[in-house]
Image (cartoon, helix red, strand yellow):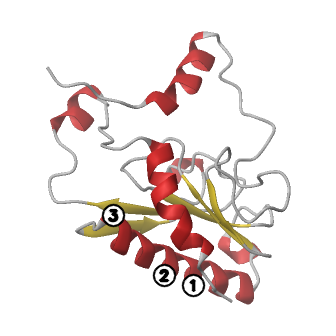
């Protein structure tokens, strides 16, 4: 028997069991303070107009979320500079993931609106999901279970030094 190790999900499981399934009033894309990174918030990088953090409920190991600092819901609400900056961060983040995690490919996308799968539709964000050949199997389809091979805090620790060296404009 194999064990699926996802301890960071326990907070969510306890909240659901307690009936506290309401949306949090604090947006995860708006971590407090101005620090450029925060392990507590899984924040890897913060610039003046954009940020990158690890997804607390990942589809795969190293699943990143890139968002504008401004609380906006749609691409049309961003300035040209904000859109360009986010794409530059997607490019830099993808490069870091290639060097550190060595994936075989990536899923990169935006879900606009609840019906498109956006979990937090009121704050636009881009998913950067590293993928490996054979990384998901029948468990995802039959048991709605994902296997994540590394603890999220270990992934954070591996990625953070590279994000601290970023100099995107």
137, 6: nearer the viewer: 6
Q: Nearer the viewer, residue 22 or 8?
A: 8
**Quadrant in the picture for residue 95:** bottom left
| Between marks 1 and 3 in the image, the one whose residue lies nearer the viewer | 3
Q: Position of residue 5 (x, y in %)?
A: 35, 30
Residue, disc 3: 101
> What label sits on residue 91 in the rendered view?
2
Disc number at residue 9? Answer: none
| Of labels 3 and 2, the one closer to you | 3
Task: Write the residue at 51% across / 32% down.
Answer: 8
Above or below 126: residue 55: above
Q: Secondary structure at mark 1?
A: helix
Q: Residue at x 42, y 56 (%)?
A: 62
Can residue 2 be seen here? The reply is: yes
Mark 3 → mark 2, Cα distance in angstroms: 15 Å
Q: Which is more toward the observer, 39 or 168?
A: 39
Q: At 21% from the left edge and 29% from the top edge, which residue is drawn?
A: 142
The residues tagged by marks 2 and 1 sit, at their Cα atoms, a distance apart of: 5 Å
At a point 71% along the width and 55% down the height, the residue shown is 29
* Label 1 Cα crowd, 10 Å radius (few <14 / some 14-19 / many 20+): some
Q: Return the residue at label 1.
A: 88
Check if mark 2's residue and mark 1's residue have beta carbons within 8 Å: yes
- Depth check: give the residue in front, 26 or 155: 155
Element assignment for label 2: helix
Q: Residues within 10 Å of mark 3 (few under 14, many from 20)?
A: some
Image quadrant holding the C terminus, namely bottom right
Percent across and percent down for residue 76 are: 71, 76
Q: Residue furthest top?
A: 18
The residues tagged by marks 1 and 3 sit, at their Cα atoms, a distance apart of 20 Å
Mark 2 nearby-residue class (10 Å; few <14, some 14–19, many ≥20): few
Q: How many marks?
A: 3
The single residue placed furthest to the right in the displayed view is: 33
């Amino acid at each position: 028997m194999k064990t699926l190790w996802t301890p960071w999900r326990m907070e969510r499981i306890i909240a659901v069991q307690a009936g506290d399934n309401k949306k949090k009033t604090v947006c995860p894309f708006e971590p407090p303070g101005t620090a450029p990174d925060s392990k507590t918030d899984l924040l890897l990088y913060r610039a003046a107009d954009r940020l990158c953090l690890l997804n607390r409920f990942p589809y795969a190991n190293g699943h990143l979320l890139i968002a504008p600092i401004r609380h906006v819901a749609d691409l049309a609400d961003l300035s040209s500079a904000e859109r360009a900056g986010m794409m530059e961060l997607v490019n830099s983040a993808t490069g870091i993931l290639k060097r550190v995690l060595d994936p075989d490919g990536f899923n990169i996308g935006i879900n606009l609106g609840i019906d498109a799968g956006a979990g937090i539709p009121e704050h636009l964000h881009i998913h950067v999901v590293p993928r490996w050949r054979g990384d998901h199997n029948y468990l995802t389809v039959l048991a709605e279970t994902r296997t994540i091979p590394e603890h999220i805090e270990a992934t954070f620790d591996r990625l953070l030094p590279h994000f601290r060296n970023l100099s995107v404009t």
